[in-house]
Image (cartoon, rainbow, N blue to C red):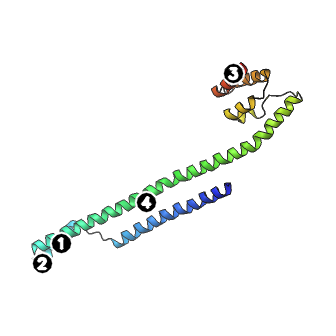
C-alpha cells in the first residue's frame, strides 16, 4: 500500500513539472508569433499611405482600430498565459513542501508504531520483575496520545511519578489531565 502511494506521488511530480514546461513553451510560441508595433508608429505608416492616396482616411482609421484591438487581445492573452505560468511556478514549492511533509508524517507514524509496541512490552516486563526505572521507557519522545495509552497499565505510585516528572519538565496539560483522570479512577 505504501509503495503504491509513493509511486502516485512520484508520478505527480513529473506531471506538475511537465505542465509548467508546456505552459512555458506555449508562452514562448505566442511571443514568437507576436509582433509589437507602437500605435504611433502604426498611425504614422497609415497616415503616409493616406497622403500617397493608397487608402482613404476612413479605411485607415478602421484598419488602425482593428489592429489595435487585435493587439490588445493578443497582449491580454499573453498576460493571462504569463499569469497562469507564474501561478503554477508559485504553487510548485508549496506542493513540494506538502508532499515532503506528508511523507515525513507517514514515516514518523510507521517508525513510532514499530518501536512503541516493543517498548510497552519491555515496560510490562520491567514492572513484572520489579526492576527500578521510570515507568515509561522513552517517555520524552512520546506524544500525549502515546503516553495516555501507556499510563493505562500503571500503578498509582507509578502514575504519581509520571505526573511529578511531567510537571517538572514539559508540563503538558493533556498528559497531566490524563494522569489525574487515571488517579481518580
Residue in view at x 41 percent, y 58 percent: 84
Picture disc at residue 79: none
**Residue position for label 2:** 55
Q: Residue furthest front?
A: 185
Q: Earlier in the sequence, mark 1 or mark 4?
A: 1
Q: Earlier in the sequence, mark 3 or mark 1?
A: 1
Asked whether the residues under the numbered discs 3 and 2 touch, taking CB atoms below 8 Å apart as contact, a structural biologist would say: no
Q: Position of residue 168 (x, y in %)?
A: 70, 23
Residue 168 visible in this rendered orientation of the protein: no
Q: Distance between the Cα atoms at labels 1 and 4?
A: 33 Å
Q: Quadrant of residue 129?
A: top right
Asked whether the residues under the numbered discs 2 and 4 touch, taking CB atoms below 8 Å apart as contact, a structural biologist would say: no
Asked whether the residues under the numbered discs 1 and 2 touch, taking CB atoms below 8 Å apart as contact, a structural biologist would say: yes
Above or below for 175 versus 68: above
Q: Secondary structure at mark 4?
A: helix
**Residue position for label 3:** 180
**Residue position for label 1:** 63
Amino acid at each position: 500500500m505504501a509503495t503504491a502511494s509513493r509511486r502516485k506521488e512520484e508520478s505527480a511530480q513529473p506531471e506538475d513539472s511537465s505542465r509548467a514546461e508546456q505552459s512555458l513553451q506555449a508562452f514562448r510560441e505566442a511571443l514568437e508569433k507576436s509582433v509589437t508595433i507602437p500605435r504611433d508608429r502604426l498611425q504614422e505608416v497609415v497616415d503616409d499611405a493616406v497622403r500617397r492616396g493608397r487608402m482613404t482616411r476612413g479605411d485607415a482609421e478602421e484598419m488602425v482600430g482593428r489592429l489595435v484591438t487585435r493587439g490588445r487581445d493578443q497582449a491580454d492573452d499573453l498576460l493571462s498565459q504569463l499569469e497562469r505560468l507564474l501561478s503554477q511556478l508559485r504553487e510548485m514549492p508549496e506542493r513540494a513542501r506538502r508532499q515532503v511533509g506528508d511523507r515525513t508524517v507517514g514515516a514518523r507514524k510507521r517508525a513510532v508504531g514499530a518501536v512503541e509496541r516493543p517498548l510497552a512490552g519491555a515496560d510490562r516486563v520491567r514492572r513484572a520483575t520489579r526492576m527500578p526505572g521510570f515507568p515509561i521507557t522513552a517517555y520524552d519522545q512520546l506524544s500525549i496520545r502515546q503516553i495516555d495509552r501507556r499510563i493505562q497499565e500503571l500503578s498509582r505510585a507509578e502514575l504519581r511519578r509520571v505526573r511529578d516528572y511531567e510537571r517538572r519538565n514539559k508540563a503538558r496539560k493533556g498528559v497531566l489531565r490524563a494522569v489525574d483522570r487515571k488517579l481518580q479512577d
